[in-house]
Amino acid sequence: MTTPDRNRAMAAQLVRAHDELRRELRRVRSQLGSGDAVLSRSLTTHCLAFCDNLRHHHTMEDGGFALLDGELAPVLDRLRQEHHVVSAALGRIRDLLGSDAAAADVELAFEQLSEQLERHFAYEEEQLLPALNG
């Protein structure tokens, strides 16, 4: 696959991954918003699976960033920093899920994560998609 073809494939994969993570985050938040005071085992498992999927996505991105043009270095640095911030938020969520935290506390943590992710995904797409599709 030529570099332009590979870059377009990376762009398409990035959009697909972000769309799936957005859908999954909405599902988790919807389940958390059901009003149950205590998290069920299946909901806890779902929340943890989402955290694992997001962490894997960012790990793969960080590795893939090395293939991109050097002109994007400031953008890539910011994205890597944001990945660390998101990772810390995921750690807080995991801590909550491993404790006797109320569902409302976990719901708030996912709400905050959702806000962070939407800003992160929007910036990443705004900066990387034109470069990859160009």
Image: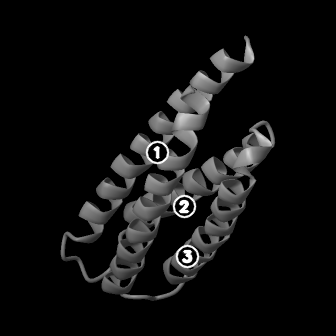
Q: Residue furthest top?
A: 1
Nearest the viewer among 96 and 125 is 125
User: Which residue carries the number 1 mark?
Assistant: 18
Q: Counting other residues with Cα less than 10 Å from the Cα at mark 3, is it few (<14), some (14-19), or many (20 or more)?
A: some
Q: What element carries label 2?
A: helix
Quarter in which the N terminus is drawn: top right
User: Which residue carries the number 3 mark?
Assistant: 89
Disc number lying in front (2 or 3): 3
In screen coordinates, is 57 left or right of 22? right
Amino acid type, residue under disc 1 in the picture: His
In space, the residues marked 2 and 3 are separated at their CA atoms by: 10 Å
Amino acid type, residue under disc 3 in the picture: Ala
In space, the residues marked 3 and 1 are separated at their CA atoms by: 18 Å
Query: Which mark is drawn over residue 51?
Result: 2
Q: Which residue is drawn at 49% across and 56% down?
A: 123
In screen coordinates, is 133 left or right of 109? right
In space, the residues marked 1 and 2 are separated at their CA atoms by: 14 Å
Nearest the viewer among 53 and 87 is 87
Q: Which residue is drawn at 64% across and 53% down?
A: 58
